[in-house]
Image (spheres, grey):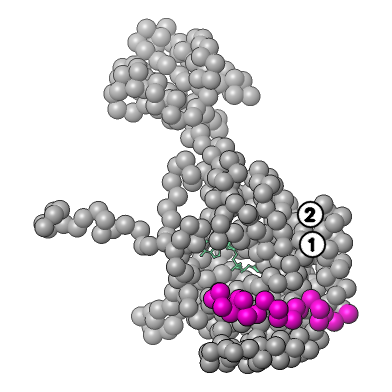
Amino acid sequence: MSGNLDGARAKDFAAPRGIPDYYPPTSADFRRVRDTMTQAARLAGYGHIELPIFEDTALFARGVGESTDVVSKEMYTFTDRGDRSVTLRPEGTAGVVRAVIQHGLDRGALPIKLCYAGPFFRYEKPQAGRYRQLQQVGVEAIGVDDPALDAEVIAIADEGYRRLGLTGFRLEITSLGDDASRGPYREALQEFLFGLDLDEPTRHRAQINPLRVLDDKRPEIKAATADAPLFIDYLSDDARAHFDTVLTHLKRLGVPYEINPRLVRGLDYYTKTTFEFVHDGLGAQSGIGGGGRYDGLMRLLGAKQDLSGIGFGIGVDRTMLAMEVEGVAHADTARCRVFGVPLGAEAKAELVDVAGRLRAAGISVDLAYGDRGLKGAMKAADRSGARLALVLGDRELAERRIEVKDLSTGEQHEVALDELVSEITRLLG
Ligand code: HAM
C-alpha cells in the first residue's frame, strides 16, 4: 500500500476526465479570447445575459432535439433532491430563448441582442480539443428575420478571431431552408435514405428526423450518404433570396466564406443560414465556432409568438488551441507592470506602502515576498513580466529615494520616494 494511511492521495482529487484547468500563463489567453469576443459583440449593441448552469432537462431535450447526439448521448442529467430532472447546460441558445420568453423580453424592442460567456457540459469522449466542460462565448439576436443581421452575427465572430491574431481559419456556410423548403427536401432525402441498406435504428431515425442521419459519425454511414440530396438544391424562392442577401452582405463586409452544402450541425433547431468557423491546424476537432438561424425555437419552447433568431457559439478552448498553433498565444502574460525588491525589513514595510499607492493609481504591482536576497528577488521580478523593478535598500531609504530599473533595457536611476507615483506613471506612459 502506498500513500498516507488515513488520508487520500493527490491523484484521487484530480479534475474529472476531459475537464481542463486554466492557470497562468495560459489563463491570460483564456481571458483574452473571452474578452475579445464579448467586446466585438458589445460594439454591435449586444447586452450581457447571465444564465443558469443547469435547467429543466426538458428544455434541452425539446430545444436541441431528442435525436441529436448532444441530447441522446452527451447530457449530464441528474435528479435533484426535489425529484426534478435537471441537466447541466450543453449549449446556450435554448436557455437564452427560455429567458426571453419567461421575462417577456420579446414584448420590448426587437431584435433582442444578447451575449453570454461561460461553461457548457457534454459527456463526449475526451480528446485534444474535445472536453466535457467546454467554454463558449455566444450571441443571440432574436426577433427580426433580416439577412443583414445574419451577416452582422457572422462578422462579429470573424472580427473577434482576427483581433486575436488568427488568420488560418475558414468560414463555411450553407442554408437549411425555411418551412416551405423543408417538406420537399425531407421527402427527397427520405427517398434516398430508404434506398440504402441501413440498420434498424438508423432507418428509424431516417423516418423521424432524416437530416440527423447526415450527422452520423460512422464512416460506413458517411460513405453511404455521400451522394445524398443537398438542402441547398431545394431552397424555396424566399430562402434562396435570404441566403443570397447574406452572402452579398458578407462580401461587402469583406468576410471571406466558402459555401459548404454538406455542412451538418449537431443541433436540430437550425433553419436558413447555418455556418461554422473551421481551423485547419486543429486536426479532427476543427470547429472553433458555429451557429445559424432558428425559426421555430420560440414556438417549440412555448412562446405565443414565433420569432426568428440568429446566433453563434465560439469555442473558447479550441480558439486557444488555434492561437497556440498559429504562434499568437501568450501575447500578454505579464502579471504586473512594476515589481518591488526590498533589501531588508524596513525597506519591505516602505515598499508595501508604495505598492498600495501605485495600485490606488491603477498601476499593477507585485513584491518579492519572503527573504530571498537581491539575486532571487531580481529573478522573480524578471519572471513576473514587469517593465520596472523598484529596488529599495537601507541607504536609499535613509535618503527617501528609490532605485527604478527598466527590466527590458537594464537602465536605472534614482527617484525621490515622494515623486514615485508620478514618475512611474510617466515612465509607463
Ligand atoms: P456548437 O457547434 O454545438 O453550437 O458549439 C459551438 C462551439 O463550441 C463549437 O464550434 C466548438 O468550438 C465548441 N465546442 C463544442 N463542443 C465542444 C467540446 N466538447 N469541447 C470543446 N469545444 C467544444 C452551439 O452550441 C450553439 N448553441 C451555437 C449557436 C448559438 N447557434 C445559434 N446560436
Q: Position of residue 327 (x, y in %)?
A: 58, 40
Which SS class for mark 2? Answer: loop
Q: Residue at x 87, y 67 (%)?
A: 245
- Decide which of 138, 250 is in the foreground and name it: 250
Q: Is residue 334 visible?
A: yes
The residue singled out by tag 1 in the image is 151
Which SS class for mark 1? Answer: helix
Q: CA distance from mark 1 to mark 2?
A: 9 Å
Q: Which residues are magenta?
A: 216-237
Q: Position of residue 392 (x, y in %)?
A: 40, 15
Rendered position, 388 above or below 142: above
The residue singled out by tag 2 in the image is 255
Q: Is residue 41 visible?
A: no
Q: Quadrant of ligand 1?
A: bottom right
Q: Report the amino acid beneath label 1.
A: Ala
- Decide which of 312, 427 is in the foreground and name it: 312
- Decide which of 211, 84 is in the foreground and name it: 211
Q: Residue at x 28, y 23 (%)?
A: 371
Left or right: 46 in relation to 202: right
In contact (CB < 8 Å): disc 1 and disc 2: yes
